[in-house]
Image (tube, grey):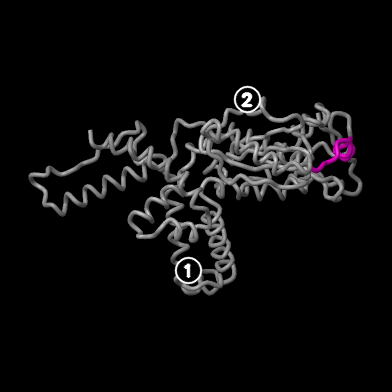
């Protein structure tokens, strides 16, 4: 067990209690003082390749084929793969990964090489040290994250999944923590937790939309704290240094995001079934039938972008396909080209095509169901 020589109640303190305050003995994990444990396995530089894929990667086969001295990690929450190799080999690794995936008809998304990334492998730490450190910091992290409870419930609603997610974050912090900076691990972990909670929204709904929502929420809160009332549209635009037109456009993005975020399925009820009422064509005017067709198509499109309740946590299908929905809607009804949408949303056309293709496959199934 982790020990605090002078204060047995430390486990009830915030996550940054890892700081060695005056008069308090250092934390000890597995019989090793915390600082000594990290110093024994110093952080080192490796070239890293980041990428995502358009369908599940056979990870066991991929690991078996990797060159010697190369490792891979998978962040299920972000759907991101990271391959680490010796310095100077980043671009060679990137080309190898691209060719390996292409040979198995797997598309890579956002593949890029990064040179001299400083990381440590948590598994290289003494097992007893790592186990006790995680046992100590997991409950502290959960308490630290109480201020983000609404966001966490939205993205990780199951308590067991949340506990697992926090465990993964602690290990991630262990891998990134640089003990030479003079910052206690607990303080570093607390800072990273706030960042990673925000990244949940970025991963699920897109970086641009999530950041837009975050900026608006902060501006609203700051204005209300200063003036004790909600701002008008013009006041909020001025407060954020934007034009009213920009604020309206961003507000529409946020509204769309909020509408899709909590969408589980347009099929409605707990049994996943809802009746779609279409008037008899012999009794309904053509205009009503046109509206009914549009309603059915809108129903099918939104349902095709909804999370799949049967998908495992971490899979893309378990999250709303916001980018796919936006691509289809804006190019079909908004009269925009993919190039225009790409510039507005700050993403690549290739990435849009990946998400739009997922919509197309699901949309065909939905329209077939509705026409039966």
Instruction: Tell me if mark 2 has few (under 14), some (14-19) or many (20+) residues whose alpha carbon lies within 10 angstroms of its own.
Output: few
Between residue 107 and residue 250, name the one nearer to us. 107
Which label belongs to residue 359? none
Left/right of residue 281 with respect to residue 294 in the rendered view: left
Instruction: Tell me if mark 1 has few (under 14), some (14-19) or many (20+) residues whose alpha carbon lies within 10 angstroms of its own.
Output: few
The residue that disc 1 covers is 246
Q: Is residue 213 above or below residue 134?
A: below
Label 2 secondary element: helix
Residue 304, magenta (yes or no): no
Residue occupying the point 90% across, 41% down: 25
Q: Which residues are magenta?
A: 33-45
Left/right of residue 330 with respect to residue 104 in the rendered view: left
Which label belongs to residue 60? 2
Image coords of residue 177 (percent x, y): 79, 44
Residue occupying the point 54% across, 30% down: 104
Residue 37, magenta (yes or no): yes
């Amino acid at each position: 067990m982790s020990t605090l020589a002078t204060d047995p109640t430390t486990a009830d303190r915030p996550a940054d209690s890892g700081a060695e305050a005056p008069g308090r003995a250092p934390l000890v994990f597995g019989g090793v003082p915390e600082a000594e444990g990290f110093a024994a396995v110093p952080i080192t530089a490796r070239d890293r390749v980041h990428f995502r894929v358009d369908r599940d990667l056979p990870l066991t086969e991929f690991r078996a084929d990797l060159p010697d001295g190369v490792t891979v990690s998978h962040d299920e929450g972000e759907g991101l793969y990271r391959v680490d190799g010796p310095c100077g080999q980043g671009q060679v690794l990137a080309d190898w990964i691209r060719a390996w995936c292409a040979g198995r008809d797997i598309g890579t998304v956002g593949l890029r090489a990064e040179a001299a990334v400083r990381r440590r492998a948590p598994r290289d730490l003494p097992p007893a040290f790592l186990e006790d450190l995680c046992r100590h910091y997991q409950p502290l992290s959960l308490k630290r994250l109480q201020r983000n409870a609404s966001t966490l419930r939205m993205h990780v609603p199951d308590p067991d999944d949340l506990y697992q997610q926090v465990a993964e974050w602690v290990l991630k912090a262990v891998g990134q923590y640089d003990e030479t900076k003079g910052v206690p691990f607990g303080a570093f972990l607390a800072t990273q937790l706030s960042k990673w909670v925000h990244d949940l929204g970025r991963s699920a709904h897109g970086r641009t939309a999530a950041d837009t929502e975050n900026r608006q929420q902060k501006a609203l809160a700051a204005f209300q704290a200063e003036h004790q009332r909600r701002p008008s549209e013009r006041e909020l635009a001025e407060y954020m240094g934007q034009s009213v037109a920009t604020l309206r456009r961003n507000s529409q993005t946020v509204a769309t995001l909020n509408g899709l975020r909590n969408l589980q399925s347009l099929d409605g009820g707990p049994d996943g079934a809802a009746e779609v009422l279409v008037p008899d064509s012999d009794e309904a005017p053509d205009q009503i039938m046109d509206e009914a067709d549009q309603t059915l198509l809108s129903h099918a499109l939104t349902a095709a972008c909804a999370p799949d309740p049967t998908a495992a946590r971490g899979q893309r299908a378990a999250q709303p396909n916001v980018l796919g929905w936006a691509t289809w809607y804006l190019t079909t009804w908004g009269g925009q080209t993919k190039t225009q949408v790409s510039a507005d949303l700050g993403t690549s056309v290739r990435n849009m095509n990946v998400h739009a293709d997922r919509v197309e496959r699901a949309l065909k199934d939905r329209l077939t169901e509705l026409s039966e």
